[in-house]
Image (cartoon, rainbow, N blue to C red):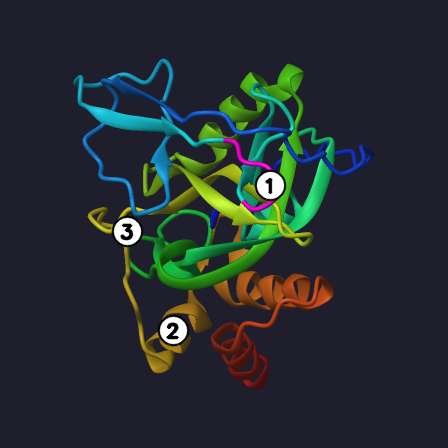
Amino acid sequence: MGNDGASQTIDSMASPSPQPASGRRRATRAWINVGEHRAMPGESLLPLAGEGGAKRRMRVSREALLDGEGLIAASESDLWVFGYGSLMWRPGFVYAERQSGLLRGYRRSLCIYSYIHRGTPERPGLVLGLDRGGACHGAAFRVEAAQREATLRYLREREQVTSVYHERIVRVLLPEGAMVAALTYVADRKHPQYAGLLDRSELLRLTAHAKGRSGRNADYVLNTVAHLEEVGIKDPTLEWLADQLRRM
């Protein structure tokens, strides 16, 4: 979700909010050979259909659908997607509904080195990722069943170019109190592009002069902050960094 290279945007906003599921359904679990990653508490791992490579083992848990206080879904085949960066204002896929969403347990962070779009291997830039700890306000998109597979293909092409993100199903809180199970992409802490938690001086040093295929890293930061402000999301670190970049 930090990859902000050019893409065609096709979106629609129309449908009413989903109704809470009536009654309680049991959770189901399945084992599949797709990767040996561990899920964080409260999350599950989505199968990467058709992905090549060695067979590895991963648990997938379809969360119980609860009425009122717990997880809901528009239908068993609809897909929710959680965006925290450029996906919020440039989703690039057809969706039926968009709501504000809160994800707990992860935070928005400039924690991914960019060697292509906003930097080079010699002078890397930084782009956003979801990293462990804290909470993150973002956007939750509901994709209807007919668009599910096309959306998954698009997102994997967009987000998994260098495999720096893990594909996850996480619990996202919607404004009226409902919880939905949503697809998102979180930083792979073992990937060479994972920068970790950097202090502010290092953030400024890396973003001030880096430039890649999609333009200046400074412009990426400034555009990100401007879009977050438009939807009322405050991020003190990004706002400080944008202020410093404007002064240079």
Q: Secondary structure at mark 1?
A: loop
Q: Is residue 54 above or below residue 79?
A: above
According to the picture, the residue beneath numbered tag 2 turns out to be 203
Residue range corresponding to the magenta coloring: 65-69
- Would you say 229 lies left or right of 24 here? right
Q: Secondary structure at mark 3?
A: loop
Q: Secondary structure at mark 2?
A: helix
Residue at 16% x, 18% y is: 54
Q: Is residue 154 above or below residue 206?
A: above
Closer to viewer: mark 1 or mark 3: 3
Q: CA distance from mark 3 to mark 2?
A: 15 Å
Identify the amino acid type marked 2: Leu
In front here: 189 or 57?
57
Q: Is residue 127 above or below residue 15?
A: below
For marks 3 and 2 on the same chain, the one whose residue lies earlier in the sequence: 3
Residue at 33% x, 61% y is: 123
Is 66 part of what is drawn in magenta? Answer: yes
According to the picture, the residue beneath numbered tag 3 turns out to be 193
The crowd level at tag 3 (other Cα within 10 Å; few <14, some 14-19, many 20+) is: many
The crowd level at tag 1 (other Cα within 10 Å; few <14, some 14-19, many 20+) is: few
In front here: 83 or 1?
83
According to the picture, the residue beneath numbered tag 1 turns out to be 6
Q: Is residue 91 visible?
A: no
Identify the amino acid type marked 3: Gln
Please tell me the numbered disc located at residue 182. Answer: none
Identify the amino acid type marked 1: Ala
For marks 1 and 2 on the same chain, the one whose residue lies earlier in the sequence: 1
In front here: 80 or 17?
17
Q: Quadrant of residue 106?
A: bottom left
